[in-house]
Image (tube, coloured by chain):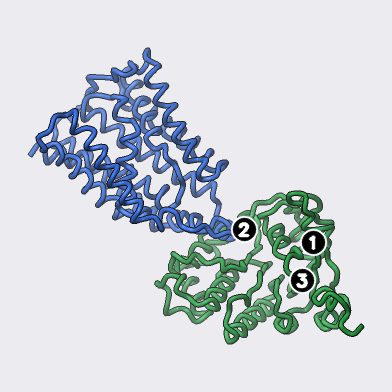
Amino acid sequence: MSILAVTHLSLTLQDQHILKNISLSVEEGDVVGLIGPNGSGKTTLFNVLSGFLVPTHGSVHFRGQDITGFSPSKRAHMGIGRVFQNFGIFREMTLEENVLVALEALPAEQRKALGNLKEVVQGTLEMVGLSGHAKKKAGSLSGGQMRLLEIARTLKSGKELFLLDEPTAGVAPKMTHQVGDLISELKRDRKTVLIIEHDLPFISRVCDRVIVLNVGEVVLDGKPSEVKQHRKLQEIYFGADPTS
Amino acid sequence: MDFFLHLVVTIGLWIPISMGYTLLFGKGQVMHFGPIGVSVACGYAIFVTLGATGSYIAGIAMGILVGTAVSLIFAWLALRLENDGLGVMSIAVHLAAMVIVLNWTDVTRGALGIPRIPRMPFLETLPMFALAVTLASLFWIALFVWADRSALGRQMQALSESESFAKAMGVSRAKVHTIAFVLLGLAIVSDNVFFAQYIHLLHPNDYHFPTFIFLLAIVVAGKPGSMVGAVLSSILLVLLREGLRFIDLPISVLGPMRLLLFGVILLTAVYVRRDTLFPQKRTV
């Protein structure tokens, strides 16, 4: 069974058709890239998947359950984790508090299963090489460190489906590799990942499958090597077939 | 000695409400301008019940019931309104509570207030009263410091920095804000149990807007969201206010001067703390 199934999903905001009849499914353990030009509806789709927007039509199923009307926090409790384009880190809180707040938001049974939260926090910070900065304010971190912390925090809080919105945006090239390695780690742990990204080499490196959105519609869906060579992708990004 | 004990009582009465308010307004950035509206409802609930039944237990129970109910109404409003809308609505609720108190004269005696409020037997002497208020205050200090350092405090701060990020991690705004509203409401009940007994009078003038300005000045001057700041600021501003009594001026001048002074303190504190009070909100 698919971990995520989106069926005939449409969204209209202020008479603008932002998403048009999108249907897709994602298998457990897949790493799927979501690409497309600016304004194609990628982040809006993530907002619908994580519960910040309610679709006009269609449904979203997670592990077979219809979650279309569920709130963002309820979806988070079910195992959907979101990593935001503009760094979903609480800058005025310490690194330790940033991880703690995610762990403490879990339902009681999940929280108990984690054991000693302080140890989990320490482990999370060690995982991304930030254990020496536990008491520092998160706002003092670099973009790459913030991104690593955000992904690690989402992983340690037991999420199963990761929605990563431009994880390499604002990240130094050296750190981009670390972010890629962390995503590969998620894949090894059989986590399911959806990534919005403009960096095509990065997408090719970490994803098993790529979905291309254009003007709110799914226009391509396939392996990275196939999608990269597809004429339609060239048309979307360059306006016309460059070979013609 | 009596004046010192009076200061102890007055400071002890301001600390719980200031800490509760700094948790909600300071840390949570919830524009709730109606804590004195909650206070007037609690005060009258306690002492009208006391007058009707002669029982302090019944009065306090009614105070807790009404304090919790009004706090839940504010929490409900907070979940349904934008922050600025809540600010306006909470002022309106405060004013509505005052209109009811002033006009429902059969029960509240209107502008005359309720006089001759008896003290509980063990609170009849000033030292005992000061001791009881101090113990109650210490309880609330411990509770609010614990709340501030617990998951509740962290989740309040996370929600105030970015509601979207916090929700995406599973933080429930409804749960967190409702708990904070109720904690503040219960601290207000505690203050009201003591206040009218202390002056033997429950009077609507003590619940007008200037009282809220004083509370706001304490919280903003003490750094919004800071528990230590709320305690220190309560001490300093109460000392300043009570110290004004020694200025040799007629009461008709001293009253407005005091209001003006706290208005200036509030404006200065808002200016100095403008980045903490009105931070840039981050959205998805």
Q: Residue A77 carries which label?
A: 2
In this orientation, which residue lies closer to the viewer: B179 or A53?
A53
Q: Residue furthest right?
A: A244
Which secondary structure lies at badge 3? loop
Circle 1 sits on which residue? A5
Q: Where is residue A169 in the image (x, y as percent from the top left)?
A: 62, 75
> For the residues marked 1 and 3, what is the alpha-carbon distance in whole angstroms?
20 Å
Q: Which chain carries label 2?
A: A
Q: Position of residue A224 (x, y in %)?
A: 80, 80
Q: Can residue B61 be seen in this view?
A: no
Left or right, B161 with respect to B37, comes to right
Q: Looking at the colours in the rendered structure, which chain would you say is drawn in blue?
A: B
Of callouts 3 and 2, which one flags the residue occurring earlier in the amino acid sequence? 3
In this orientation, which residue lies closer to the viewer: A164 or B281?
B281
Crowding around mark 2 (Cα neighbors within 10 Å: few <14, some 14 to 19, many 20+) is many
Q: Which residue is drawn at 21% across and 43% down?
A: B238
Q: Do labels 2 and 1 share a chain?
A: yes
Q: Looking at the colours in the rendered structure, which chain would you say is drawn in green?
A: A
> For the residues marked 2 and 1, what is the alpha-carbon distance in whole angstroms?
18 Å
Q: Where is residue B40 in the image (x, y as percent from the top left)?
A: 36, 29
Q: Mark 1 lies on which chain?
A: A
> For the residues marked 3 and 2, what is the alpha-carbon distance in whole angstroms?
30 Å
Q: Which mark is residue A36?
A: 3
Q: Which mark is residue A90?
A: none
Q: Which residue lies furthest to the bottom in this view?
A: A174
